[in-house]
Image: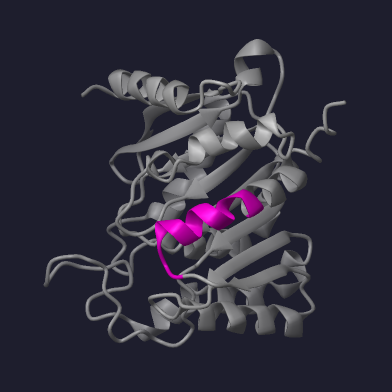
Amino acid sequence: MSRRAVAVWLGLLLAAVAPALAAGRAECDVIPSKILGTSVRYCAVLPENYDQNKTAKFAVLYQLHGLGQSEQNMVEMGGWSLLDDLRAKRKIGDFILVTPAAGATFYVNSRDGRSRYEDFFIREFIPAIERRYRAFGTSAHRGISGISMGGYGALHYAFKYPQMFAAVSAHSAALIEDFPEDLDFGEAEGRTTPFGRPLDPAYWRANTPFTLARQNAAAIKRLKIYFDCGTEDNFGFEHGAKQLDEELTKLGVRHEYHLYPGRHNIAYFSAHLPASLEFQSHAIAGSAPPPAP
């Protein structure tokens, strides 16, 4: 199926599941990358006002998918109709949401230097998206968020490049400070991982949000930070979330942190995704519009 056909199909799906809502639209396309030597797929969700007001500029939220997922993660979670629902209820304002394909990269440059996904995302993807769409193109109107591996990536980018973002949010982020001997990347035996094979403990630690928070404590104080996790997370990430809360508190970095009942699954993510979308909307798009009279 062509990308155009996929976009049309997604639009029809959205219209079918939410006929009463004023719907935005989805675009799925590619960004060519000289750094990676290939093109990277992405999906963007545009608010209804994007087409209605041809001169308006918009904030951008980069929503990073988890391991084993793809750029269409928001469709699989019902997140695109959720955006329209939250706008209809005037809980969020207008912003563009973009999800790039990232495979099993953990959103970092690989230890062996063969896959420089982080360089691609920061140097090529963000500038290309904000040229392609009518984005403000400023840190004040740019947020980053993610789920699981994507939560790790969002915190990694925000803490390493705090000058580029206004806000970061994460659900069930893959937060493990100590070297994970049994980390499973879902790849065939013998293939490399972003942290080396065998995994390099020093490279793992250098890339964790814990290390980056300590290195950039003064700079990340300007960020708005939100993260949550389920109390029965299948991978034990609730311990890492608690540890990050304690570390940020020790560093004097203001943040919002929650542990909620739940596991590492779509039911948990779907239940709490509205919280991060509202959090990001207030941070990068201004307060949501006042309730209709």
The image position of residue 9, as x and y in percent, is 33, 22
**Numbered marks: total:** 0
Q: Position of residue 194 (x, y in %)?
A: 32, 66
Residue 205 visible in the snapshot? yes
**What's drawn in magenta, residue-wise?**
263-275
Q: In the depicted view, which residue is nearer to us: 19 or 14?
A: 19
Q: Please give the name of the residue rendered at 46% of the width and 42% of the height, measured from the top-left corner.
A: 99
| Residue 129 on image: x %, y % | 52, 32
Residue extending farthest to the right is 293
165 or 48, which lies in front? 48
Q: Is residue 140 above or below residue 54?
A: below
Residue 56: x percent and y percent?
Answer: 72, 19
What residue is rendered at 42% in x and 23% in y?
16
Q: What is the quadrant of the C terminus in the image?
A: top right
* Residue 54 in sight from this viewpoint: no
Determine which quarter of the picture holds residue 38: top left
Q: Is residue 267 magenta?
A: yes
> Is residue 143 part of the magenta span, yes or no?
no
